[in-house]
Amino acid sequence: MTNGVQTLVLYNNDTFGNVGASQTIDFTIARPSEPFPVVPVAAVSVAVAVVVVVGLLVYHKKHKLNMVQINSWSISKDPKNYQYT
């Protein structure tokens, strides 16, 4: 049942078709609200952060150019990729 005022009325009938009703009973349900799930949310946040960091490290490692610094020139294994810094 949800929080708030509830109403209860019992009805009965017999085999002869007679119908009866009880008194109306009003009552209130007041359950405390459930606390915010801090631990699961924190665990999922940390897990997502770890996955993102690992993914970025793997991406960086796979796409990193092997650069050799010679004085002020950066020369990669690809001769088309010379850069002056």
Image (tube, grey):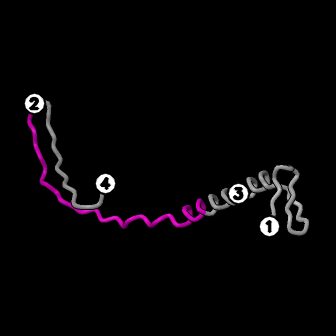
- Give percent across and percent down for residue 36: 46, 66
Tell me if 4 is positioned left or right of 73 in this view.
left
Q: Is mark 3 on a helix, strand or loop?
A: helix
Mark 2 lies on residue: 16
Lower position in the chain sequence, tag 3 or tag 1:
3
The part of the chain drawn in magenta is 17-45
Front residue of 74/21: it is 74
Categorize mark 1 by other alpha carbons within 10 Å: few (<14), some (14-19), many (20+): few
Circle on res. 56:
3
Magenta span has 29?
yes
**Residue at the spot of label 1:** 85
N-terminal label among 2 and 3: 2
What amino acid is found at the position of numbered circle 3 in the picture? Answer: Leu
The residue that appears at 87% across and 58% down in the rendered structure is 75
Image quadrant in which the N terminus is located: bottom left
- Foreground mark, 4 or 2? 4
Q: Earlier in the sequence, mark 4 or mark 2?
A: 4
Of callouts 4 and 1, which one flags the residue occurring earlier in the amino acid sequence? Answer: 4
User: What is the secondary structure assignment of the residue under circle 2?
Assistant: loop
In the picture provided, is 16 more to the left or to the right than 82?
A: left
